[in-house]
Amino acid sequence: MRASLRCLSLSMVFLVGLLVSSAASAHDSLRERLDAFVRAEQKRQKVPGVAVAVVSRGRVVLAKGYGLSNLEHQVPVTTDTLFQSGSLGKQFTAMAVMLQVEAGRIALSDSITKYFPDAPATWAPITIRHLLTHTAGIGELDGLIDVRKDYTDEELAQFIYGLPLDFPAGLRWSYSNSGYVLLGLLVNRVAGTSYVNVLGEHVFTPARMKTARGISEEDIVPNRAAGYRMLDGVVKNQQWVSPSLNTTGDGALYFSLKDLVAWDAAVDDRALLTKASWRDILSPAKLNSGAPYPYGFGWVLEERNGRPVHQHTGAWQGFKSAFFRFVEDDVSVIVLLNLADANPEPFANGLAAIVNPALAVPPLEPIPDLEPELTARCATLLEQMREGTLNPAEFAYVPWWFFSEAVPFYQALLQRLGPSGPLALVKREVRGDDRVSTYLVQVGPMSLRYRVALIPDGRVSVFSLSPN
């Protein structure tokens, strides 16, 4: 009897050993495939330095640096290297705002004129929630502000006051750095200290984000990466901006890969705030019409292959960032790059697909076109773009630079490439109140992705062309 039990026990130990060995081997194989993909994508995009993390079901599958954080001093990227956040910092500004809500200092339904009393009277309908969800209608300061000039908080506010409203509050969604600059200023006012200090005490420290901090040119910052850009095929240092513009709430933070892995765990646990606050943060915006828009408070809330994905990207001063959370699959991917011309999304999407092929970006393939008259109009718009005969009266809510910068660029591109082939519809969707059509079109030797959005009255709110 004892001999039989002993044999059974030894067999169980052997079986468990085999299972552990098999799991370890599979984990090593996955890590090797992820590692090989990152190296290949880094080479393809010619990125000096890359830091990536992949977390699956709470387990860090990969957290590693590649290449150089500083080309001049040949410093390698590690998991401690600090990268600039860009707009990935917006979800942290939203955290600082929600901490003030929970402290009873502000309410999401408050008009922002309560805290900015010298703002234009037309701002009265704009609430804090509108700022958080990019539905306020406040004009964009990017491209208008002098990035080499230092501004006080009051000067920044006055500059934004002077921007025209693009639409009434809540009517539409339009990405706005101006709104998040105002949110940072709002926290500074109601908390009595910088929003970065609020984050340091109430988010970074309790979340164990040990090196996350605000950007500073004068401080000695260990493990700070350098940001780069390409100029005529040559890598150059990032362009200088004034110190004050690296203190604003639209995305002016440093963090490392370790910091963001810790942040991922905090988001997983819905830590630091109440569950009700997290529901607000991760719920789609609701427009005046009642239509939802897939953006929360500093988070893009979309779906891929029927599965929810919460994500945001960032770009600033020679850095790119991406944080993707595939919620139902419990997979998170973090990507930090130090090249302005790089794109973090192919890294994030490729890594996710290796972990779970169901998370791959579906290929763009032609679908039945049930509205050929709409496609005919889009084809006409494309040719009018080529010929320079677009009618501005057919457009609404396009950014201020669309006709002065985008139209000449697209016109030159189309004329250089040659004749356009037929439009192949690959996607038609509703985003907010807009109907968006995406096509593939062959223009000379190049396949382009062509996207057009129409508002309810039929005017064009989006016209974009990009390589397929």
Image (cartoon, rainbow, N blue to C red):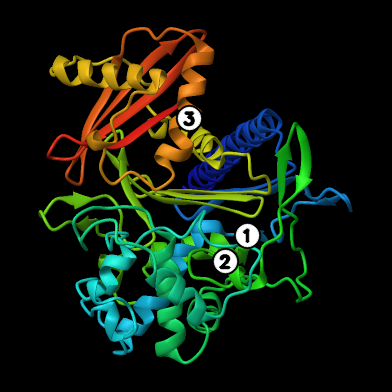
User: Which residue is drawn at the image coordinates 66% and 68% (left, top)?
Assistant: 242
- The earlier-in-sequence mark between 1 and 2 is 1
- Front-most of 412 and 232? 412
Image coordinates for residue 241, horizontal then vertical, percent: 67, 62
Quarter-of-image position of residue 177: bottom left
Disc 2 residue type? Ala
* Vertical position of residue 131 compared to residue 12: above or below: below
Disc 3 residue type? Pro
Distance between the alpha carbons at the discs numbered 3 and 1: 32 Å
Give the residue pinned by disc 2. Answer: 252
Quarter-of-image position of residue 171: bottom left
User: Which label lies toward us, 3 or 1?
Assistant: 3
- The earlier-in-sequence mark between 3 and 2 is 2
Distance between the alpha carbons at the discs numbered 3 and 2: 32 Å
Distance between the alpha carbons at the discs numbered 1 and 2: 7 Å
Task: Determine whether the residue tagged by mark 3 lies in a helix, strand or loop.
Answer: helix
Q: Residue 84 carries which label?
A: 1
User: Which residue is drawn at the image coordinates 56% and 73% (left, top)?
Assistant: 208
**Around disc 1, counting alpha carbons within 10 Å, would you say few (fewer than 14), some (14 to 19), or many (20 or more)?**
many
**Around disc 3, counting alpha carbons within 10 Å, would you say few (fewer than 14), some (14 to 19), or many (20 or more)?**
some
Disc 1 residue type? Gln
* Vertical position of residue 217 compared to residue 342: above or below: below
Task: Determine whether the residue tagged by mark 2 lies in a helix, strand or loop.
Answer: loop
Left or right, residue 425 beside residue 178: left
Give the residue pinned by disc 3. Answer: 408
Q: Do the CB atoms of the residues marked 1 and 2 lie less than 8 Å apart? A: yes
